[in-house]
Amino acid sequence: MAQIDEIRLQVMWNRLISVVEEQAMTLLRTAFSTSVREAGDLSAGVYNARGEMLAQAVTGTPGHVNTMAEAVGNFLAAIPRQEMFAGDTYVTNDPWLGTGHLHDITMVTPVFKGAELIGFFACTAHVVDVGGRGFGADGKSVYEEGIQIPIMKFAERGEVNAVLVQLLRANVREPNQVVGDFYSLAACNDVGKTRLLEMLDEIGLPNLETLGEFILSRTRKATLERIAALPKGSWSNDMLTDGYDDPIRIAASVTIGEDRVSVDFDGSSGISRWGINCPMIYTKAYACYAIKCVVAPDIPNNAASLAAFEVTSPVNVVNAVRPAPVSLRHVIGHMVPDVVLGALAQALPGQIQAEGAGALWNVHISARPVAGAEGRRAEVLMFNSGGMGARPTLDGLSATAFPSGVMTMPIEATEQTGPIVIWRKELRPDSGGDGAQRGGLGQVIEIAAAQGHEFEFSAMFDRVTEPPRGRDGGAPGARGVVELDDGTKMRPKGWQSVPAGRRLILKAPGGGGYGDPAERAPEARALDRRRGYVTDGKE
């Protein structure tokens, strides 16, 4: 009988994952912003009554999923149980209590079965605008970066907070898109709640306690077994990134103990005066993701597996405190996994990939008609990716978003959101670092305003002065380049203008190579040339 019960609980666990995947699909299908519906810049998950994450949707990013795992506890601390009612939905974009910057909206919905609070659904998505200076690094404090929404109710007993909606409309440049995304987030949680209650009724469970304990106990046991098999000790690594006007150093020491893996970021640069700082909740998310990729990639991601990883730091660029500007926290946060993996490579030689582009090459475009011309204004956000680092036995993946895992938006969908034309989007030859295994290629993107328009853009690029490093003798990947089509060099960060008639050209960095280039197989080199990945002349 006990074995049959375990099989039933495993089936229910799989069913629960299907529920949160349907929750995420609802957001993808109803979202207004292209960053959500086309790129999957979101997360969705289900939690027990104590706010512990039980399951996450496959669709989503580590920066959202792992921050949300902590954020739900912040919601529970802010809203007393006696003020939670059926039909409620709670919201925040607080960078330190949510997911690291104001553009991410997190919503939490309680689930009641009868009078009993049995759990929560939560979801997060990046919206196109939150007012302020816009999505960029130019702010000197979080107060310049947009509207701040403390943990509060978006809806109470099914009634939407009309005052909050009015405030949103008055503070953002794209009110219909933003308010539409708020409703999509709420609908996403409602679908999860409905499906969960149907599941519990079908299988005859009064709440999530039995299933939740089964999930967390099995995950905890499996994670601890993996940690016990690792070498014990401490290893350190650091990395220079471009920063805004001065390079930023990210330093990490990784300690593997009997039942825990700890990361400490002491030695990293201090808080920047520009909006590239990273709140600790986001640093934790990506540090844990890096560890999990190595230690337990096949073990489900939930509260029990995350509990085995400890992340600490003094106040610095990866533990920025209020009111530090944090709009581009992903530029630093996306570098965190490569720093952690570099330390783990010393503990596990021959098993860890080389460094890649890391941070997404996002570009936020604010397009408008030229003086005297008719046209429309629009805010357009594009996600672009450089190359991944080469792996010990395989080449790096080209134009692939690691560690964020988001997809790129199709150019057809992007061009529909505003008056811009994307003239070119293709792999960048000669950008992957040489090695026994070649680094992944970056890409080249060429953007212009539509006829009669001009645009400003927020540059949020890195690896322009500091390239991704190879591993075990592999060569570095190519540095990134930001320029106009007439050769004018543009800054890698900050708001800048592109005159009418000119085109913006982005060349995303390639990944580092792995191993001695002399050991690359001749047939692999020949294939690289046939495919155009490597040419006779370097850039």
Image: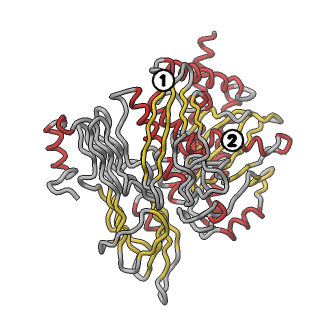
Q: In terms of secondary structure, where does tag 1 sit?
A: strand
| Residue reaching furthest to the top | 1
Residue 233: give its label: 1
Residue 21 shows in this picture: no
Q: In whole angstroms, how far apart are the C-alphas of marks 1 and 2?
A: 33 Å
User: What percent of the width, then of the height, locates residue 177?
Assistant: 59, 64
Q: Give the residue number, with chain letter if any, for mark 2.
A: 72
530 relative position to 381: left or right = left
Q: Relative to 4, is 50 on the left or the right?
A: right
Which residue is at a point 48% across and 60% down the rendered structure image?
244
| Residue placed furthest toward the right | 82
Q: Quadrant of residue 5?
A: top right
Quadrant of res 500: bottom left
Q: Quadrant of the C terminus?
A: bottom left
Three-letter code for the amino acid on which mark 2 is drawn: Val
Q: Answer whether labels 1 and 2 touch (C-beta < 8 Å).
A: no
| Label located before the other in sequence (1 or 2) | 2
- The image shows residue 139 at horizontal and vertical percentages of 58, 64
In the image shown, does 412 or 303 lie closer to the viewer? 303
